[in-house]
Amino acid sequence: MSDLILRDATIADLPAILAMLAEETIPPGREAGPDDPRYMAAYEAIEIDPNQRLIAAELNGRVVGTMQLSFLPGLSFKGSWRGLIEAVRIVRDLRGQRLGERMILWAVEQCRVRDCKLVQLTSSASRTDAHRFYARLGFVQSHVGMKLHLRD
Amino acid sequence: MSDLILRDATIADLPAILAMLAEETIPPGREAGPDDPRYMAAYEAIEIDPNQRLIAAELNGRVVGTMQLSFLPGLSFKGSWRGLIEAVRIVRDLRGQRLGERMILWAVEQCRVRDCKLVQLTSSASRTDAHRFYARLGFVQSHVGMKLHLRD
C-alpha cells in the first residue's frame, strides 16, 4: 500500500467512484446507471463548493477507494468548524488490507488542516464491524444517527 | 404559539442564540463568553455560505429557539442533496410546548424546498427523550453517530 495516493477526485474518476457507490447499498439497487446526468450535477455541486471534497484513493493508477469530506462552520464549541465524513467505500477485492485506515487517518488530518474541532460521521447501525473500525481510530459512539427520507 | 416566526438569523439575534447554545452543553462549560470574536467569525462563515442557514425562532419579538441547517451535495442516492440539522435549542422556559416540533417540521420543509432526498441529524446517545421526539416526527434511528475530538 506504499503507493496509495489520496487526492481530490476529478471527472475521470467518476465512473470508478460511482461503481463503488452502487455496490452493497442500503437499500439494494438505490443507485442509477453511471451515465445518469444527476451524478454529473452532483459532482459539479461538490466541485464548486470549497467546503466539499470528493476524494479518490488511487493505488497503482487504479481508483480503489472514495469518500466525501464536508467542512461545516458552526457556532458551537466557540465557533468551531467540524468535519463530516460520508460515503466511504473501498473496492471489494482490496478490503481487509487497512486501506480504510489510511483513508480515515488522512481525512482526519485534512480536518486538522482546516482547523476543525471535531470530525463526525454516521455508520449504519447494522455495521458493527465498521463501528469497531472507527472506534480503533479514536471515534467515540456518543450519538445516535437519525434519518428521515423525503422521497424515493 | 400562533405567532411563531421561523427565519434566518441576523447579527442582532446572535446574543440570544449564543445564550441558548451555552446552556446545558456536553461537556458543561464548553462555550466562551458571547463577545468572543470566534463567534462572529463563525456567524460570518455561515452567512456567506448558501448551503448553511442559521435559524432563529421568534415568538412575540423574542428569540426562543435556534438551529442550523446544512445542505450537502453528494453522489449517493442518484446524486441527491441531503439536509443536516444541528445545534437545535429552545429556551428553557418554553420547553414542552411543541415549539421544537414546529421548528423541526419547518426545517424538514426547507429541506424539501431544496430538493433534499433525506434529512439527517445526530442526537446525544443519552438524550432518549430527544430520540423519541424525532421518531414521532418520522426520523428512523438507523445509524450510530461517532465523533472524534481533535482539540479542546
Image (cartoon, coloured by chain):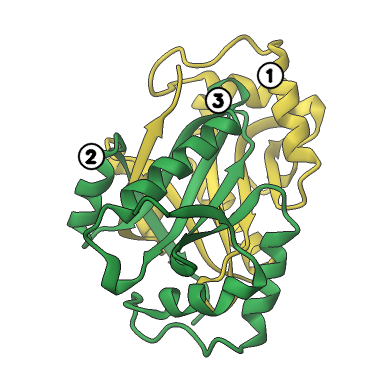
Chain colours: A green, B yellow
The crowd level at tag 3 (other Cα within 10 Å; few <14, some 14-19, many 20+) is many
Q: Is residue B62 above or below residue B33?
A: below
Residue visible at 64% across and 37% down?
A73
Read off the residue under disc 1.
Answer: B38
How far apart marks 1 and 3 lie (CA) works out to 14 Å
Left or right of residue B76: residue B136: left
The quarter of the displayed image where residue B107 is located: bottom right
Q: Amino acid at mark 1?
A: Arg
Q: Is residue A93 above or below residue B2?
A: below
Q: Nearer the viewer, residue B74 or B18?
A: B74
Which circle marks residue A136 in the picture? 2
Circle 2: element type: helix
The residue singled out by tag 3 in the image is B21
Read off the chain for label 2. Answer: A
Residue depicted at 72% across the width and 39% down the height: B46
Q: For numbered disc 1, what is the local secondary structure?
A: helix
User: What amino acid is at disc 3?
Assistant: Leu
Which residue is at a point 56% across and 27% down the rendered structure image? A76
- Mark 1 or 3, nearer chain start: 3
- Circle 1 residues within 10 Å: few <14, some 14–19, many ≥20: some
- Image quarter hosting the N terminus of chain B: top right
Mark 2 is on which residue type? Arg
Q: Whole-Å distance between the Cαs marked 1 and 2? A: 32 Å
Q: Residue at x 58, y 11 (%)?
A: B32
Residue A26 location (% of width, % of height): 34, 75
